């Protein structure tokens, strides 16, 4: 046990929790952290904006399947992070936010950046979007509050947490050791209250489909899902956030279900299945509502570790509270269910042969078109062809999200990251930096629109400063794609005008910071540009000039498109 101040204690504790990178914008109220990190092996990444720091911490958390950490001053530093932390909360991503607040004696004096209850109260902003938000009142409670914050992030529903630490407490000496928690997996529990209903449903059903959500990835149950599907010839569709939960080249993978999902997935779930087994997915607007009425499915079995995600009265589902892996273990040992599943294999295989006869892609011809300006479907199809199979992608919000969901093939779990539920624009460059630092051995591509680049594309300077080799593909169409396409379809001239913009030179923007950047406006240039980007030792931006009038694939009944 050595003498250390509170900032040093926290950094050492984070290092014991296997955190090797912290993202921040420096400021006076966190000065002790700025010197304390030198006594650890933690890397401090200084970002252009606090939102970038929070998005990087989120990308780091998702890629590492742990938690990420961001640090900022109270007041404007924390308020700059709010959208990013709200997005992490919506997507169940654990991010620990540490804020430095003013000394107690400054409170109530209209001090600059007063984030106490007498000023702009950080805690009141953060409480609705975190599992735990507290200010540390005394030095003695620092270890306990830190552990509470970390544990809170890994409850049944993963969520961010927030600790506000006054400057004078950061500077005080704390002589105490730290025992790490190292949280990772969801609790291995299963409530069997309704499992008899599952047995009864499966005993007289043949056409069964698995809808796999991100909960299966959190519980590291994707191998079990695949083994179960293979054993009983059961087709698998996924939510967008769980894209690749089993390889999309697997014969039993039928792609993403929901907005911009595959036609196979829509056909299976809404028109053909007698039973839909939902494994760790919330039946929200993107996953279940936008493409049609899920009540068309005769029987839904909904498995989720979080009871709150099972309380949707729109669907007559059998709720099973539990871990996905534990549910599959029970199911494989339930003789009534397994006998019925085994007897249905032949009929299911015949059923799937019929499904395979319909098209998978909404517009397969778009993947090979020679039409100019370039079509996003072909750009993304060729990007997939050029990229290693184990490549990670971070997909920003916009029309390109739908094109990527439809035309990018994912070969493994936890390699496609999309901020789906809150859907802010502009996170992809920062998120890709965080993901790359979490898993430096894997290539990482940010796919973003020109609108998103206008918001937080400045974080490319962070990638340059730390020589982080990410690839940034900008689908540059001079419009805010989703709202432009809706206005274009509905012939709303005023809205069209407002959603159009100049076509900016993002390649020059990247070059101005020292990154490599190229403009591509012809299909024959794509492969060369992709190969150069993927082989670069630093950040590389491809400004892909695409048309704005190309409609997104399989939009279903979404209010967005």
Image: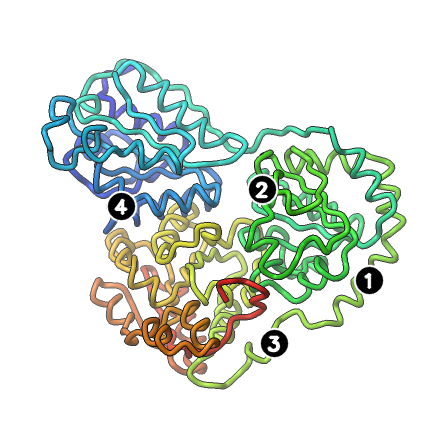
Give neighbour class at mark 1: few <14, some 14-19, many 20+ (Cα, 10 Å).
some
Which is nearer the eye, 105 or 265? Answer: 105
The image's mark for residue 364 is 3
Q: Nearer the viewer, mark 1 or mark 4?
A: 4
Image quadrant occupied by the N terminus = top left
Residue 447, percent across and down?
A: 42, 63
Residue in view at x 41 percent, y 33 percent:
18
| Secondary structure at numbered mark 3 | helix
Label whose residue precedes the other's in the sequence (3 or 2): 2
Give neighbour class at mark 2: few <14, some 14-19, many 20+ (Cα, 10 Å).
many
* Marks 3 and 2, how far apart at CA: 31 Å
Q: Nearer the viewer, mark 3 or mark 4?
A: 4
Label whose residue precedes the other's in the sequence (2 or 1): 2
Mark 4 lies on residue: 80
Position of 29 compared to 218: left or right?
left
Label whose residue precedes the other's in the sequence (3 or 4): 4
Position of 359 relative to 303 (above/below): below
Residue 452, percent across and down?
A: 34, 62
Q: Are marks 3 and 2 in contact (CB under 8 Å)?
A: no
Label whose residue precedes the other's in the sequence (1 or 4): 4
Which is nearer the eye, 17 or 68? Answer: 68
The image's mark for residue 351 is 1
Residue in view at x 61 percent, y 38 percent:
311
Q: Nearer the viewer, mark 4 or mark 2?
A: 4
* Marks 2 and 1, how far apart at CA: 28 Å
Residue in view at x 72 percent, y 39 percent:
318
Mark 2 lies on residue: 215
Position of 128 compared to 352: left or right?
left
Position of 385 relative to 161 (above/below): below
Label whose residue precedes the other's in the sequence (3 or 1): 1
* Marks 1 and 4, how far apart at CA: 52 Å
């Amino acid at each position: 046990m050595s003498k250390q101040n509170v900032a040093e204690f926290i950094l050492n504790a984070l290092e014991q929790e296997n955190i090797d990178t912290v993202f921040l914008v420096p400021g006076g109220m966190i000065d002790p952290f700025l010197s304390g990190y030198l006594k650890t092996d933690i890397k401090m990444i200084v970002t252009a904006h606090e939102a970038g720091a929070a998005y990087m911490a989120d990308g780091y958390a998702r890629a590492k399947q742990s938690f990420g950490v961001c640090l900022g001053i109270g007041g404007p530093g924390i308020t700059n992070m709010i959208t990013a932390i709200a997005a992490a909360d919506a997507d169940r991503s654990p991010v620990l936010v540490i804020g430095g607040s003013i000394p107690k004696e400054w409170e109530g004096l209209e001090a600059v950046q007063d984030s106490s209850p007498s000023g702009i109260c950080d805690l009141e902003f953060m409480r609705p979007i975190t599992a735990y938000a507290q200010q540390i009142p005394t030095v003695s409670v620092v270890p306990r509050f830190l552990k509470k914050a970390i544990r809170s992030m890994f409850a049944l529903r993963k969520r961010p947490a927030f600790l506000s630490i006054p400057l004078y407490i950061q500077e005080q000496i704390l002589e105490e050791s730290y025992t790490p928690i190292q949280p990772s997996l969801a609790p291995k529990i299963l409530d069997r209250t309704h499992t008899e209903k599952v047995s009864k449903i499966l005993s007289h059903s043949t056409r069964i489909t698995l809808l796999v959500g991100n909960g299966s990835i959190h519980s590291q149950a994707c191998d079990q899902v695949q083994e179960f599907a293979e054993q009983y010839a059961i087709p698998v569709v996924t939510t967008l956030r769980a894209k690749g939960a089993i390889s999309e080249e697997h014969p039993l993978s039928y792609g993403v279900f929901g907005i911009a999902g595959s036609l196979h997935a829509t056909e299976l779930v809404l028109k053909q299945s007698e039973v839909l087994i939902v494994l760790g997915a919330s039946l929200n607007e993107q996953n279940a509502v936008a493409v049609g009425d899920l009540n068309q499915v005769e029987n839904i079995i909904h498995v989720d570790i979080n009871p709150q995600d099972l309380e949707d009265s729109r669907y007559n589902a059998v709720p099973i509270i539990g871990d996905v892996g534990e549910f599959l273990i029970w199911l494989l040992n339930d003789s009534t269910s397994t006998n019925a599943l085994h007897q249905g294999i032949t009929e299911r295989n015949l059923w799937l042969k019929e499904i395979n006869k319909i098209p998978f892609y909404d517009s397969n011809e778009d993947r090979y078109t020679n039409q100019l300006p370039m079509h996003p479907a072909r750009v993304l199809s060729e990007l997939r062809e050029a990229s290693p199979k184990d490549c990670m992608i971070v997909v920003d919000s916009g029309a390109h999200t739908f094109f990527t969901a439809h035309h990018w093939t994912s070969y493994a779990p936890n390699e496609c990251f999309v901020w789906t539920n809150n859907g802010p624009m502009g996170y992809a460059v920062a998120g890709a930096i965080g993901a790359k630092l979490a898993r430096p051995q894997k290539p990482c591509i940010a796919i973003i629109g020109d609108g998103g680049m206008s918001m937080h594309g400045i974080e490319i300077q962070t990638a340059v400063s730390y020589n982080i080799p990410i690839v940034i593909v900008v689908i540059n169409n001079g419009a805010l794609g989703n709202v432009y396409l809706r206005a274009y379809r509905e012939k709303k001239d005023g809205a069209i005008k407002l959603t159009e913009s100049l076509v900016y030179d993002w390649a020059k923007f990247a070059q101005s910071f020292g990154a490599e950047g190229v403009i591509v406006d012809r299909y024959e240039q794509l492969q060369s540009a992709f190969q150069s980007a993927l082989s670069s030792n630093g950040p590389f931006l491809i400004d892909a000039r695409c048309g704005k009038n190309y409609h997104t694939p399989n939009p279903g009944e979404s209010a967005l498109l």
